[in-house]
Amino acid sequence: MPHPNNISEILKSHTADLKWQREFYEDLHQHPELSHHEERTAAQIEQKLREFDCELITGIGGFGMAAIFRSDAEGPTVLMRADFDALPITEETGVDFASTNGNMHACGHDMHATALLGACAVIDSLRGQWSGTFIALFQPAEETSDGAKRMIADGLIDKLPRPDVCLAQHVMPGPAGQVQATPGPILAGCDSIRIRIAGRSAHASMPDKSIDPTLIAAMIVVRLQAIVGREVPPGEFFVISVGELHSGDKNNIIPDSAELVLNTRYYDPALAERVYEALHRVVEAECAASASPAKPTFEYFAHGEVTDNDPATALAVREVFDGVFGDKVVDATPATASEDFCYLPQAWGVPYYFWLVGSTPEDLLDSPPVNHQSNFIPDYDPTVEASTTAGAAAVLTFLAKS
């Protein structure tokens, strides 16, 4: 593996003209498309990829695609992934290229796609200075947590060369252009849980004739936080949020059922299993205490794995990042958001590395907009420069000639 300083020098010698990135980014931002509907976005990405010397495979798991860059010399295979779907959020950024279709790139996936295309341009311009194979993978439907799985189900591992390592990045709050990196967990695992509670309906004026599922649900909401507060060790991380509570549709009728939809976040899957055992115990006990006529039901869905960086891969890339970015690279605090990226390396059984890039304008650092908010917009110049350079540097960590 080449010395990190050599990679910094290689990057300085690239001849790619990246002026197109701003127009490309603003176009994607202005035309956001929701998960599984990214037809125009995919077409824009494909059009740009066709300008490079690469083999292109399209239509993987919907609108997913991969560009395969091969050198003339044997070497490792490195895959880097970017997502490109948007969210059903009405934009309130005030920029002149804001979306007006009721959807929004509020998570920065437009930046991810632009940066990976930029890294493709850089790597393509450096032929002769790297060996092996570089795969740029563009994934749809990250926001629904099934984009990676759909690509895998559509034969991804048979359609591409087997990578030796997988890479990805995400823009986040923090000084724009700052690279945030860490070994081990960097994004949380997650689950959604739908709980159905049975009651007995009655007129609101006759509560004694009912078994009130709304009251049971309310008691469960309170007790769930007692699990976190009293059964999770203080030094460990776990979040249970009640995102939905549905019960009844008429003010003078006590309903016959209620439904809770929970969302959890964690870094330790073993801890999650212990919390889920407690969750079942508490919900069943509250239902029994109120004489619910049937046992509650539990439906788990939208599972996301912990994004847990391989230590050796993290060390290798971090040394290169330190050489390229200097004091602009910092130790990352693990984020509590979740991702589906890790399903890709897991499908091949290979190590992976995922890092974060700060994107907050300097004047907003005291109270930065966060991903999925209607006013989230990266500070373009430092963010695109850092994310493009980080992508190329991480790839060259494994492919650059010594």
Image: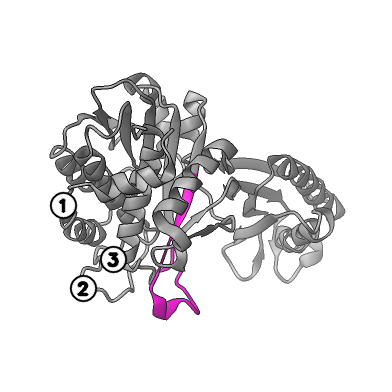
- Which residue is denoted by mark 2 in the rendering? 96
- Identify the element where label 2 is drawn: loop
Residue with the mark numbered 3? 381
Give the left or right position of residue 123, taking residue 257 as reference.
left
Element type where label 3 sits in the image: helix
Residue 68 is drawn in which quadrant?
top left
Q: Is residue 251 magenta?
A: no
Q: Residue at x 33, y 51 (%)?
A: 389
Q: Could you say which quadrant of the image residue 179 lies in?
A: bottom left
Secondary structure of the residue carrying numbered label 1: loop
Judge whether 41 appears above or below 63 on screen: below
Locate the N terminus by quadrant: top left
State the residue position of label 1.
Answer: 17
Q: Is residue 109 visible?
A: no
Write down the region rendered in magenta.
354-373
Say which of marks 2 and 3 sits in front: 3
